[in-house]
Image: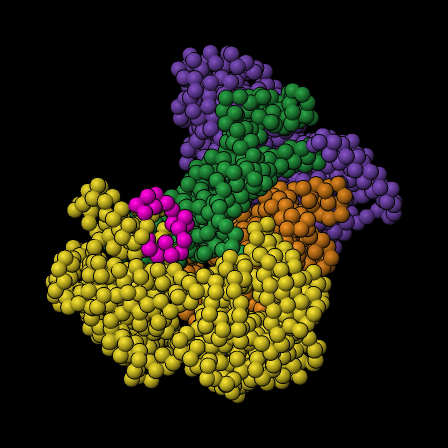
Amino acid sequence: MALLDIRNLDLNIYGVPVLRGVSLSIAAGETLGLVGESGSGKSMTALATMQLLPRGASARGSIRLDGEELIGRDERAMCALRGRDISMVFQEPMTALNPLKTVGAQVSEVFRLHLGAPRAECDAWASQVLERVGLPPARYAPDRYPHELSGGQRQRVVIAMAVALKPKLLIADEPTTALDVTTQAQILTLMRALVAEDGASLLLITHDLAVVAETADRVAVMRRGEVVEEGETAAFFGGMTHPYSRALLEASTHVPQRRPRVAPGTVPGTAPAAREGGPILVADGVVREYRGRRAGWFRPAGCHRAVDAVTLSVAPGESVGLVGESGCGKSTLARTLLALEAPQGGRILFRGRDVSSLDAAGIARLRRDVQVVFQDPYGSFDPRHKAGRLVAEPLHLLRGEIDAAERDRRIARVLSDVGLRPEDAEKYPHEFSGGQRQRLAIARALITRPALIVLDEPVSALDVSIRAQVLDLLAELQARHALAYLFISHDLAVVRAITDRVLVMRAGIIVEQGPTAAVLDAPQHDYTRTLVAASPDLARALAERRTRAMPAANGRSADAAVPSA
Amino acid sequence: MLAYVGRRLLSLAVTLAIASAIVFTVMEILPGDPAEVMLGTNARPDTLAALRAQYGLDRPAPERYLAWAGGLLQGDMGLSYTYSVPVTQLVAERMWVSLPLALIALTLTTLIAIPVGALAAAKRNSATDVGVMTATQVGIAVPNFWFAMLLVLVFAITLRWLPAGGFPGWKAGAWPALKALVLPAVALALPQASILARVMRSSLLDTLGEDYVRTARAKGLTRAQTVRRHALRNALIPVLTIMGLQFSFLLAGTIIIENVFFLPGLGRLVFQAITQRDLIVVKSVVMLLVASVVVVNFLVEVGYAAVDPRLRRRV
Amino acid sequence: MAHRIARVLSLALVAGIAGFAAGVASAAPRKDVTLGVRLEPPHLDPTAGAAAAIGEVVYANVFEGLTRIDRNGAVKPALAERWEVSPDGRTYTFFLRKGVKFHDGTDFDASDVKFTLDRARAADSVNPQKGLFAPIEAVEVVDPATVKVALKQPTGRFLFDMGWAAAVIVAPESAADNRTKPVGTGPFTLATWAKGDRIELARNPNYWGRPAALDKATFKIIGDPTAAFAALMAGDVDAFPIYPAPENVDQFKADPRFKVVVGNTEGKTILAMNNGRAPFTDIRVRRALSQAVDRKAVIDGAMYGYGAPIGSHFAPQDKGYVDLTGRYPHDPKAAQALLKEAGVAAGTRLRLVLPPPDYARRGGEIIAAQLRKVGIEAELVPMEWAQWLSEVFKNRNYDLTVISHVEPLDLDIYARESYYFDYKNPEYKALYDELAATSDEGKRIELLKKAQEKIADDAVNVFLFLLPKIGIWNAELKGLWENAPIPVNDLTEVRWGE
Amino acid sequence: MTHPADIAPRVPRPFVARALAHPSFLLGGAIALVVAAMALLSFVWTPHEAGAIEIARKLRPPSTEHWFGTDQFGRDVLSMIMRGAVTSMAVSFVAVGIGVGLGVPLGLLAAARRGVLGEAVMRANDFVFAFPALIIAIMLRDVFGPGAVNAMVAIGIFNVPVFARLAYGAALPLWTREFVMAARVAGKGGALITLEHILPNMLNLLIVQATVQLSLGILAEAALSYVGLGVQPPQPSWGRMLNEAQTLMALAPRLALIPGTAIVLTVLGLNLLGDGLRDLLDPRLARER
């Protein structure tokens, strides 16, 4: 008999259907990977199982745990169940812990609550559990507060709470999405080991097929509140039947078609800027520091060096990748290169001229030639303006040079360039989907006909299928307009797909650089190696899967990150 | 932490120094002469001059400023023109009315607001919630002095349970003194409590939407347990901020309420001192009020650190 | 709704009263009294401050002068047992009481009198009524019980003046501290002063005269009329000798527990006009205003009908009074015509400055409405005393103001140079000088009448009413003053009913 | 996790439709409209001449001739209430105007420039906050004389830091938003960005706050007039009516109850309106802060 058996689950939130006839089951000791894009209803299925649905939700159907119906169960009984028989790990470890209580106390609370044991005893058990998740009390005192731990460590604490009482079912909702790749791998390994040890079942919710391929025994795919396909993992990846599953798989492994890189100035019909020879933008030993808090009245304030003597150059038509984990200084470097912030050391050269010496006209020239696309498709547009006005904003740099008719022509052109319709100029940003908005952002960057576009994590916030489309678009535009890209990302797969050259950045320093394929296939620097090894890779995961026995738990080492604050 | 406190203290001192200069200047501009008020309509010019000399009002302004500010630094607020006693003594006497009044009001505010706000948040959208929200909405709209008048009408004039005004002094016994403070404190507390209850409610609602509350629920805590053990303390942080701000409103409110109830407190003292042009009292008491607001806000900030471990190391 | 609440309220009041009356049991006469006063004295030295509140507490109770003014406004002996005036009226010899001690135990003698008078006259004197001492040329101690005072010129009202609160006798040992620790010769000593709340006096066991009937007297400071009402109703205070809210008097009148005595004061309430400033330089304008103001409406509206109308700067109870209230009958039409004649355009704007007391604020509002009817827009400018003193009284920067002159027999102010209403009439000055130098009673009365008529004729100010002294006290309480020739609360004869 | 908001289709109904379904907005708006209408009407018509003194008819209870009765000077209370609404509204509006006019530019400047200037502006604001407002008002009165203008200035001064803080607090996170970054990349300067992006995006916040300050202004005007610092007679004011009614509490409590109720209702109406506007006007930016 299945441990968890969901039958024909319908869920409405304020009358809006969210889940339709969802049926899933998980056997004891089994790991089910639940896959789907955002809004597909994965999380709601999990919350329905926990009976922690948001306000206004009403569920019909049946959810049985060990044969006992959970829907409509008395709240008191549910409370006794939660944390003991079913527990859950959430996506965002930074906010999942109460900031005002020590981690020890928060773990200990699980024991106190369900076992009612004296405090000292619970604290001792808590220490044991923390040790089990790789936070040995000797090194990570349980009287620390959450803010003193890194994201990965916090996620370990959340996991400790979840596995404290060895539940029958552990639900993990995108448990690693918010983490850096290296940490992500460690957390996944840890979770696999823990459920294996305890013989628990795991419902792993993720958007990442590679993660599922690595971890799950069976896979279910959800789309628009329905389960579209379900099967044993190997068989699933071997022979998907549903078109959506196939599309998902296709998108996950998608590599855009790129023309081979051409030497600058040799392609006929490229933009004039591309023919001018020499790199467009050069960073020469750039340093960017932020002043920390002063340690005392007479001691100077400590400095945080976000960017430390970085040297790089981008030639016309070239696509350069900049890879690193969050907080390594990528975005700061981008802002400095865009002349939005001044470097404290080193120089930035725009077409051979030091940016700090440029006059207003020179800066305007720079801005025309160097445009940017940001990560967040929601935050990069002023919600009060129409798409046409937003896209045309950089034409401010050309004021006096072009008239209204030309402006409208350009808007229409860039909109169709990015696959939107000229009529879309009359819409407001909220009327576009996330992927369309990112297209709009690209259109905005294109409108001054730049030579270089800095792309700061342009596809990270997008679902896989959309991501593939946007990458295709970027590749196509690069070819058509002979654009140079500086592509900033934490995702090695994306960087591999779209760049010629890659720089690996860690803690403000470029640790390795070279042609993309060479760096990623044969990394020289330790850090790059770790990064490559940790990155989820569907093909590799499937290959490993075939040969792998269940690995021994090796999650006992805490992640390397230093506590923040 | 120490360095932070030191830095804040320094800026506090600068603030007070500027405040003292402003207060002094305003007093200089203020029309009217304390000597004239003291001596009335039959005073002769030579008598007025003699009295001014007695007060040292004939000396140049910068000299007087330095003398006053220097005195303040040593805890000497000068000698009241009208009462001929040290201002410190006056302030000390009045403090025994104002401070208990403010504290009672603040306590009442907190005792009413926090549970009521928490209840409304916990029972969101219930009849209780709607009732609380309506009541607090009205509470905010009621001017405290008008409320004071109504309280007097009902409890002092009609029912005669409590005095309509005045203060018998603590020597008359704790009970009569407290009785005299009940109505003023209630009048002060009601609008403040209404505001605070709403802040508490929305803060708790925000907190209840936090991820860690969901984590706690996933651990098996009931809603009530979650509120008690996890949400409440977190929700109190913004409440603390508002309470800090309210202190200055409370002080301003005290001035009016003390005048409605004729309580011999600091507010009334400064009010009378202005009309009598007892400028030395006005200057010193205003400085005291400014200082207390600044200091309270400082304490609130330090108080965050006590509540919130995230700030303990950083500040 | 409001009406019903009012009815419920008055029912509640009646019920409360009944309950109260039932609860009062007759016992041995009480030996203490609590009086309500509206204003707290800034300090307790009447020789160093003008506030009437000082005298209301200490005059005749703590401090005594050579003479004293009694409840009828007459001069009576006090520390001076008797006196002799030289025929030329320039030398006064005071024969002092013997065996009088100050509260601190020091003896009272002639040297104290000399000290007091010299101190008040000195260059660094801060006496608010220094003018009272201006006629003094020299003070001579004849023997410990005799003082001779020489005057520069005969001064008809010198004995009266020596009875003022500002002329009380103080001792050199304690004079400097009298503001906070008053040391006098009176039947009461200061017991405690709880600032902002009350002042308690205790009987002086060593008093030279007839000992006071009370052991203890408390002056409770109740500034708020509502609180005053409540305090009287609740029995927290036994009397409010100068009750601040005429609007509540009827409620007390209807209550047998209380005695309501509406007496008079010397407070001549006037609408003062700045005679030195246009348009009031023109007598027609001043007369027009006198006719434009409806005195009765002002008294009814501002004072709820309490307060005797006056037609000149003279209190009806004082000797030599002439009724001049009919001199300018209320007649807006005539006033309008007069204004037109004087060339004052309709809609002329004037500043009507109002000091803090209710009579001024309320009266001013009513007067402004009346003036509007004759085409004068009076802008109301309320001021605190401090500002009023400097703006109006000192700098004469005003057009109109409402004010009550509480000093008795103060016709002299119309003869003063550059007084705030800036009345300049040599005829009147001559008249007053003659009056001042005259001691003959019949002649004085004749001159007083002339002076009153002159002021009224010239319409120096618009004369409104005499400030009433509304006293409300427990019906059992005896001996409080019914009138207030000077603003004091003499407790020497106060006792509980026999 | 997936937010319900992502699942529920976002079909923003038109503003008017949502407004008409919002109870507190409707109630608040209705009260505010009634008060405003009353104030406007009082310019052309009041049941009796507002503020006309007639001692002979003083302290009359409510009747068909005088709906709310007459006061101690025989003035018609209803007419006074109507005209008092003008005073309340005028003082409050101008005070909010002062606060917005000075505070918002200061806050925007501080946010655009940050650094020493920003710090200085915000410190100065804290400074004003620390002063006991009423005492400042009393001193202003004594220096410049009492009156409506003074009340406006006194209340206005204390509105300045409120709006400066609000503008600063709202602008600061906006400046780090990517669309502002994009505008900078488009070569736009601080002033232009402030005008095009920062200000419009905090407009709703400002409108809501202005409504709240408006109601606080009415309370403040009442308080100032109550202690004799506000508008002067014969101009009617609710606060002064309360002051004058105080000694008549035992005699005619309605004289205190009526103006007090007028104040409470007006403030309540504006607060409800503010709450409603907060809900109705795009709340996204406010939440993201």
Chain D as rendered: colour: green
Q: Quadrant of residue B85?
A: bottom right
Majority secondary structure of magenta residues: helix
Q: Dividing the image into 4 quarters, which one contains the N terminus of chain C?
A: top right
Image point (61%, 27%), residue name = D77
Image point (43%, 17%), residue name = C346
State whether residue D70 is above or below residue C487. above
Q: Dividing the image into 4 quarters, which one contains the C terminus of chain C?
A: top right
Q: Which chain is purple?
A: C
Q: Position of residue C141 (x, y in %)?
A: 56, 50
Q: Quadrant of residue C293?
A: top right
Q: Does the magenta portion include C45?
A: no
State whether residue B3 is above or below residue A248. below
State whether residue C153 is above or below residue B263. above
In the rendered view, does A350 fall on the left or right side of D252?
left
Q: Which chain is yellow?
A: A
**Can residue C468 be seen by looking at this rendering?**
yes
Q: Which chain is orange?
A: B
Foreground residue among A193 and B73: A193
Q: Position of residue B310 (x, y in %)?
A: 49, 71
Foreground residue among A411 and A304: A411
**Can residue C76 be seen by looking at this rendering?**
no
Q: Quadrant of residue B108?
A: bottom right
Image point (63%, 45%), residue name = B134
Q: Position of residue C449 (x, y in %)?
A: 57, 21
In the rendered view, does D266 fall on the left or right side of C392?
right
- Magenta range: A421-441
Q: Position of residue C305 (x, y in %)?
A: 66, 25
Q: Does the magenta portion include A435?
A: yes
